[in-house]
Image (cartoon, rainbow, N blue to C red):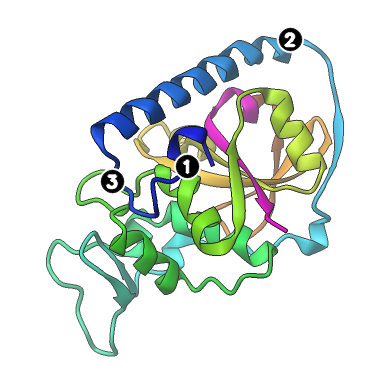
Amino acid sequence: MLKSLLNTGLEARLTPEQYALYRAELITLEESWKQSLHFLNCDFTFNGGVEPSKIPTPRCQYDYNHIIYDYRTCRELQPGETLATRHKTMADGGTVPCALSSVLEYYRHTAKLTVLGQILVKNGYRTENNGTLLIALDKVPELVYGVQTQVQSFIFDIFESVCMGKPVIALVSAAWLHALSTMPSNECIVIWRLEEKTALITTTSHHSVRRIDLYDLLKNIKRAWSCQKID
């Protein structure tokens, strides 16, 4: 968890003073990340991470259009029930909970999407117009499940985290990920393993593990969180 969020509780909402400290800390980390990208001009390879056989089956958000995931509630639709007007489902905006649930499964937590979604809704992370607030990844895993997250401030932080068996949740452009310029949103992926100049990842839009170019991935990461179970 970021230092600025210590003792702020589980709620998404921060006081103006807390939010100012949070934003300042994020800006510092983001600037450090951007500066570290110049190392991509170097030639390097890395090997290590979670064994492929131990990577959980990806949670594809598009499988869950029967789960209401709205700023007002999160629950399964009853048999024969029609989704209420202007209500959204996990398929509409479930990339954060789906990625997080995969990591929690790796750490042997039984994290049903409805339960995780209820936590996010109840505590103000699911918004009416802006998706799921990313601060959820800074607070919910640690405070609810005992899985500590750390924003990566340097590309070598990701190499170290993944090679030590700590999966990394990363936010990337959906347009880049799907090579489709018309997609305006972002998507969470999980980086599980590095093999030479490639990364093994799961996404919230496919059912299988994907292998992608490591350099290209790093250039397109907007923010990343390493995940480690607290002993």
- How far apart in space, not on screen, are marks 2 and 3 (Cα)? 40 Å
State the CA–CA distance, disc 3 to disc 1.
Answer: 13 Å
Location of mark 2 (residue): 41
Q: Amino acid at mark 2?
A: Asn
- Residue sticking out furthest to the left: 85
The quadrant where residue 44 appears: top right
Residue for point 54% across, 42% down: 1
Label 3 sits on residue: 13
Tag 1 secondary structure: loop
Residue to which mark 1 is pinned: 6
Q: Which mark is nearer the camera, 2 or 1?
A: 1
Give x and y (percent) for residue 200: 73, 45
Q: Earlier in the sequence, mark 2 or mark 3?
A: 3
Earlier residue among tags 2 and 1: 1
Nearer the observer, 105 or 92: 105
Counting residues from the start of the chain, the first of labels 3 and 1 encountered is 1
Magenta run includes residue 79: no
Q: CA distance from mark 2 to mark 1?
A: 36 Å
Q: Check disc 2 and report its element: helix, strand or loop.
A: helix
Pick the front one: 190 or 109: 109
